[in-house]
Amino acid sequence: MRKVIYPGTFDPLTNGHIDVIRRATELFAEVIVTVAINPGKAPLFTTEERVEMLKESLKEFDNVTVDSFDGLVVDHAKQLGATGIIRGLRAISDFEYEFQMALMNRKLAGDITTIFLMPHEKYTYLNSTIIRNLASLHSDTSEFVPPVVQKALKEKFNNI
């Protein structure tokens, strides 16, 4: 049984993230989608809100669980008994940073493998920053995010 984690801030979750998760569920017995708590970032949504949106959006997948963590991703992977870390690559511009992180993670935990997965090409331009910007301008995000995320974005930006 192969267990992997897919860490990210997911602020917010996009259909591109879900596409990567779908691909991971086809390759691995168990996928743990984990919200990274990064004290250096000021997320739009709380950790709890992001976890709940993930749970709601991913409930169709029997082999997916959702959690959150604070600290090194390799330490969290070890604690969970995961053998791999999923990372999404949208474009060549993602590769340099992700490659450096994969090499550092290998140095820290050589028994955990980084697996790069690409989303469908229709999601290659999509990222959470773009979604937050669109939503802040009250643009329709329904094509890019799950319904629970679209609702949360509308609520968040109607209250600002």
Image (cartoon, rainbow, N blue to C red):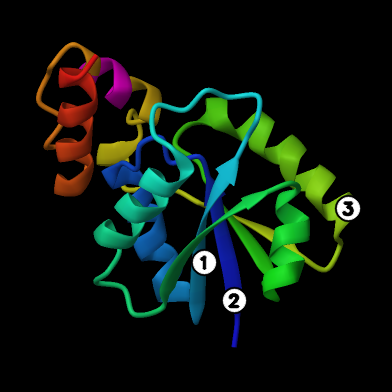
State how far apart marks 2 and 3 are (Cα).
19 Å
**What amino acid type should be assigned to the residue bearing mark 2?**
Lys
Tell me whether the residue at label 1 lies in contact with that at label 3, contact meaning CB atoms closer than 8 angstroms.
no
Left or right: 132 in relation to 47:
left
- Main secondary-structure element of the magenta-colored stretch: helix
19 inside magenta stretch: no
Vertical arrangement, residue 150 with respect to residue 25, above or below: above
The residue that label 1 is drawn on is 32
Q: Position of residue 50 (x, y in %)?
A: 39, 45
Q: Which residue is mark 2?
A: 3
Secondary element under disc 2, as helix, strand or loop, is strand
Residue 91's spot in the image, x, y percent? 47, 32
Q: Residues within 10 Å of mark 2 (few under 14, many from 20)?
A: many
Q: Write down the region rendered in magenta.
A: 131-135
Q: Of label 1 and label 3, which has the lower sequence position? A: 1
User: CB of mark 2 within 8 Å of CB of mark 1?
Assistant: yes
Asked whether residue 28 appears in the rendered view, the answer is no
Instruction: Look at 66% across and 65% down and name the residue there.
Output: 84
Q: Are marks 2 and 3 in contact (CB under 8 Å)?
A: no
Horizontal side of 108 relative to 56 (left or right) equals right
Counting from the top left corner in percent of width and height, residue 105 is at 80, 50
* 130 up-or-down from 30: above or below: above
Q: Amino acid at mark 1?
A: Ile
The kind of residue tagged 3 is Leu
Q: How many marks?
A: 3
Q: Residue at x 83, y 68 (%)?
A: 111
Q: In the image, is 62 to the left or to the right of 5?
A: left
Label 2 to label 1: alpha-carbon separation: 8 Å
Q: Which residue is mark 3?
A: 108
Seen in the picture, residue 94 relative to 68 is either above or below; the reply is: above
